Image: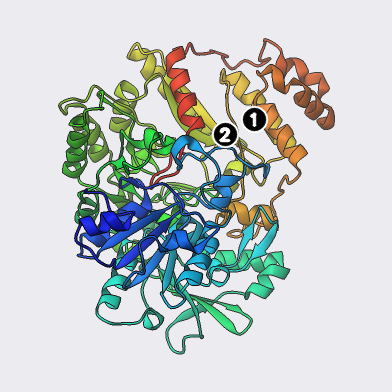
Amino acid sequence: MAFLPITVDEACARGWDQLDIIFVSGDAYIDHPAFGVPLLARWLESFGFRVGIIPQPDWRSKESFMVLGQPRLFFAVSAGAMDSMVAHYTPARKLRHDDAYTPGNRHGARPNRATIIYTSRLKEAYRDVPVVIGGLEASLRRFAHYDFWEDKVRRSILLDAKADLLLYGMAERAMLEVAQRMRKGERMSDIRDVRGTALIGSKPESITCLELPSYEAVAQSKERFADAFRLAYLEQNPWSARTLLQPYGNRWLVCNPPALPLSQPEMDAVYALPFEKAPHPSYPEQIPAWEQIKTSITSHRGCFGGCAFCAITMHQGKTIQSRSEASILSEIDGLAGKAWFRGSISDIGGPTANMYGLACGNPEAMKACLRESCIFPDICRNLQTGDKRAAALLQAARKRSGVKHIAVSSGVRYDLMELQPGYFRELVGHHVSGLLKIAPEHLAKHVTDLMRKPDKRAFERFLLRFRDESAKLGKRQSIVPYLISGHPGCSLSDMLELALTLKRMGIKVEQVQDFTPTPGTISSCMFHTGIDPLTGKRAYAAKSDREKGLQKSLLLWHQPTERAKIMEALKELGRLNEVGLLLGERSGQSEPAAKPKIPQEAYRRAEHGKKNRVATTKKTR
Ligand code: SF4
């Protein structure tokens, strides 16, 4: 049995009478590096630690948390690949009925606020055993944060979970250092200085620290909340960040600077770990998240785009950490050797596919850099944008034995791609599968500025280039734009303008993402406070379900089910006279409404991918 043990029998089969570290996870156990818990567990195993996993325990009793006994060092808790509240509720706060990380796609295998509940059960079962918390839920809730589901500012999750230590970001370095120091005999309560960790304690005496406004202050004042957010956000550069402090009454949250990024050899070493690349054999049913990523390859982590609604920068960091081409090709060869592999790779990418291999070209500037994005509002002159590595990777991957087709389904930044003609040609010529998913998210400048996204002109340039290149190649392919409704800064009138613009461009969207203020993003801060925390400018935010619903419907103007809401929106805007422009056959403008002919099979595939999108260590938006 090469899977890590999830039962005592499996641990005994390895000759292990006690485990060193036991992970508790809100997800099913899929032994693949796309998922954080198995990745960290395998990483620790490679350093000689005995590691087990308790996936999706029944949180109603402590016994489910005792199935592997007491660990010698500590428990490590993660809610799973997604925040448990995001996993459970729609943007309208309605309960979801599925869960892509659970066998059979069943809802209900994890509790709300899983990190807190799991830690509490562990402390009931083993009062004196240390518990560390990590993963996206803990990472993005490490400071006092706005919680959309309760519509209030909550304390750091460390205080509510009563855990001993919080690991934030990608935690290989922090987890290993903590485990190694404890193996040498240090107590967790004495480990206070590890990068990438946060803890509750007394105020440090000497080191250079930055004090954030207190929890009490940010809970009472939106201006103070925006101040605290800005101060913490600007302290993410691992080379220059200070230790952050946030007072809670007479206690202090102490957040050490972020861990340093992994080097390419370290990334290669992580992905060379002996993953089984399969769900644990005890699962009788399919797991949708596995079906989606089983033929997907992660080429890198990190994103320097700085999109305001995205948590990747806060979690993975701005530095691109790329694997070598050899490491990626070796993974492809392993995939091609699987009996079930049919020759199609569903993705080679990361948070943003065309950032593979890119880096800041000025190490000194990088170490002091406070820019939230390397490409917004313009492309930094220090950024190396060469596309040779990314293009060569796609070329080499296509030539591997057993590979018939490779799609790139990770998001791409089309403004960056203007400087990457080689990658653009590879992408459009070989990797689109009929439809290319791109994410303008909006086209009104004052909204895209708040989102830190390129504006309409960049989108139009890309669309022209894409259509030209596809025509030259004789390919019938088009783009699927991902758009967000209800984002801060966006009014009903902005949404109508966006709908009319898309209609003039001959673009219909099938799905629109209703903005969800997930913890830890700039956009969530704007939603709560009405302030852009980095510029101090005021930003309108649609908050009622009615307005959010109307905004979304406007973009779906071509769907008969949305007509009543569209009429309601036009009436509210006093623009009923424009009903023909939006709902009629004509676009009413001179821009060509060249509705592309899209192969139906390609469309079905793209839509299926969107509906079943899962969060892993990369993203598709
Ligand atoms: S100096 Fe420029 S390229 Fe380098 S990290 Fe900062 S924004 Fe990015």
Image coordinates for residue 591, horizontal then vertical, percent = 59, 17
**Marks 2 and 1 in Cβ contact (< 8 Å):** yes
Way the structure is coloured? rainbow
Q: Which of marks 2 and 1 is nearer the N terminus?
A: 2
Which quadrant holds residue 493?
Answer: top right
Q: Name the residue located 45 percent from the left edge and 39 percent from the top edge.
A: 614
Q: Name the residue located 31 percent from the left edge and 61 percent from the top edge.
A: 172
Above or below, comparing residue 301 to residue 503 in the picture: below
Query: Along the line of sight, which residue is nearer the eye, 62 or 46?
Result: 62
Q: What element carries label 1?
A: helix
Identify the mark at residue 240; answer none if there is no mark.
none
Q: Name the residue located 45 percent from the left edge and 72 percent from the top edge.
A: 198
Residue at the extreme bottom of the image, as rendered? 205
| Mark 2 residue type | Leu
Query: How many numbered marks, from 0 up?
Result: 2
The answer to whether any part of residue 168 appears in the image is: no
Identify the mark at residue 483; answer none if there is no mark.
2
Q: Name the residue located 25 percent from the left edge and 32 percent from the top edge.
A: 394
Mark 2 sits near ligand 1, with its Cβ under 8 Å away: no
Which quadrant holds residue 289?
Answer: top left
Q: What element carries label 2?
A: strand
Q: Name the residue under label 1.
A: 498
Q: Which of marks 2 and 1 is in front?
A: 2
Image coordinates for residue 430, horizontal then vertical, percent = 30, 22
| Mark 1 residue type | Leu
Query: Along the line of sight, which residue is nearer the eye, 299 or 342?
Result: 342
Instruction: Tell me: 393 left or right of 171.
Output: left
